[in-house]
Each structure stands twice: as structure tokens, then as C-alpha cells.
Amino acid sequence: MRAAVITEYGRPPAIAEREQPQGGDGKAIVELRAAALNPVDLAVASGTFPAGSPPVPYVPGAEGVGTVVESGRFAAGTRVWASGRGLGVLADGTFAERFAAADEVMVEVPEAASDELAAALGVAGLAGWLPVTWAAPVRAGETVLVLGATGNVGAVAVQGAKLLGAGRIVAAGRDASRLAEVAALGADVTVEIGDDFRERLAAACEGAPPTLVVDALWGPPLEAALTVTAPGARIVHLGQSAGVTATLPSGLVRGKGTQIIGYSNFGVPLDAVAKGYRDLVEHAVAGHIRLDLETVPLDTVADAWARQAAGPDAKLVLAR
């Protein structure tokens, strides 16, 4: 079968012939329809991912939407989304005509969703949705600050917080044009990250200090955010795009009773992932959640890989 194959760590995949995956022992075989390309795929392919990387050559892809060929849990022909249990991280992933996935990680895709939308809302969508619905559920009327709101994850977090009843949403990011788009999605005020960010963030939060922070950045932006949060604020930390370290004064953490909650999709119980995925897709089908996506052929995976490394505006989805 045709598949994207990593033959050397640190290099993009190329289309090549690969043996058909084998099912059984709790593994299903799925015929691919669409698969989102994610930063984690590039991280795993670097050979330095903290959770490890499969031995080369291997097929990347941490998630995918497809039709069940064989499964001990779902009938043949069922359309499912799959991610987790080492898929594309410890073993071959989804960027192939067929892939093997653990039965327990598969979720039936709501009928009204397109393949591309169902794929785009998986890893990235859940990383924005579950922090505000599961890790630290939004409280009615509260002020929510989203750090990294110009990315796909942050955009979903903004819309999710709005949908769940946040009273005020402050969106922070580096791209001014993308911030304007996030404002149209529901952010009440936007703050561009750059010079004087701390002062401008303080002005944006004056009179309504954030009680929930969704942080996809870490580093200096979080350091600034901690100075404006309310006592007892919850910080859900899910990314380090602005730096791998942050200096947080003890007094601001202890004195405010700040809660810092580490978040990763990999750490969420499977039942919560399944519910969150179904809820998110249904909201998107109903028009409550929007995500820019671009579909590209699987055969152009090397070009898509380069675009992902550069930081694309739209969510890239590989389709057969």
C-alpha cells in the first residue's frame, strides 16, 4: 500500500510502498479518509520527542479519520476517528492507505461531519476544547485569558469559552491579522504580544482580572499573565511556543492561591476524549465552532510537512 514514510529522523516523509498493517489482539484496521497534520508529528519525527519515536522507517500520523475494515468493537464500514495508545508515536501512524489502531481509542464520527472537518478537530481541536470543558471548566460570567489565541488550538479555546458562558474573553497572540479573526470568533479584547505586552495586557484586564488562563505559550507571556490574574485563578498549561522555561515569582503563585494545571491530550481518560470529541464535532457542525482548514493530497505530504514546520494559518488535513 502507499504510505508516507519517515526513513531518517529530522527529514520529511516521502511516499513509498509499505506492507499492509495487521489487526487482531485489540487492534482494528481502518481505511484512511483524512488525517490532520500536527506539530507532534514533526516532533516525533525529529527523533528527540520525550515520549520516544518509532524506529525508522515508520509511518507518521498521530490521528486519522477512516472507515473500519475490521474491528472487535465496531462494524465494518463505521466511520471513526482514532488517536492515542502510541499511534504514530510508538508505532506506525495514520498517513497511509490503511492504518492499525487500538479498538479502545476509536470514536464514531458524527454523521453530519465531513471527513476533513472530523480530522481537523481531533488533536488540535481537543487541545483547545478540553482545557475549558474538562481540565478547568469555564464558570459562567468569568474572565478567560487565552495565550496563543492566534493558533488553531487557541481559536478553539476562545470559541469554547464563549460557548460555555464566559463573561469576557481576552485573546493574546503575535499575529495582528489573526487576532482580528479571533475577535470575530468571540474574543472581547485582543492584545498583540510584543513590546510592552505586560503593560497592554494589564490595561486590557483592568477591572476584570482573569480567573482562567489557557496557556499555549509558557515563557514571558505567562510571566506577564500571572501579574494580572485574580486570586484563585486556574492556569491550564498546554504548550511552550514562547519558551521552555518561565520564571514565576513564588509570591504571585502562593499569595494568589494560583492553580497551575498541566494539560496534555495524552493524559485525558479515553471516555473524556470520546465525549469531548463528539461534543466538539457536533458544535462545529452546528456552526458554533469554526476552524480554518485546508485539505491537501496525501501524495504532497512532504510539501505539507514543510508548511507545518513554518506555521501554517489553516489546519492542514491530508486526504487520499
Image (cartoon, rainbow, N blue to C red):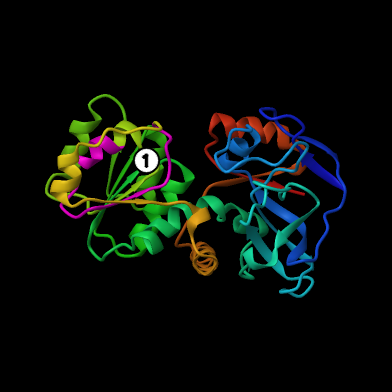
Q: Position of residue 142 (x, y in %)?
A: 23, 59
Q: Is residue 184 left or right of residue 313?
A: left
Q: Position of residue 293 (x, y in %)?
A: 58, 47
Q: Is residue 313 visible to the viewer in this orientation of the structure?
A: yes
Residue at the disc numbered 1: 180
**Residue 232 in magenta?**
yes
The boundaries of the magenta stretch are: 222-242
Q: Position of residue 190 (x, y in %)?
A: 29, 41
Q: Is residue 228 visible to the viewer in this orientation of the structure?
A: no
Seen from the viewer's position, the closer of residues 202 and 114 is: 202
Q: How many marks?
A: 1
Seen from the viewer's position, the closer of residues 289 and 124 is: 124
Q: Position of residue 149 (x, y in %)?
A: 38, 43
SS at mark 1? helix
Image quadrant assignment for residue 141: bottom left
- Which residue appears at 40% of the width and 33% of the height? 244
**Residue 230 in magenta?**
yes
- Which residue appears at 15% of the width and 49% of the height? 256
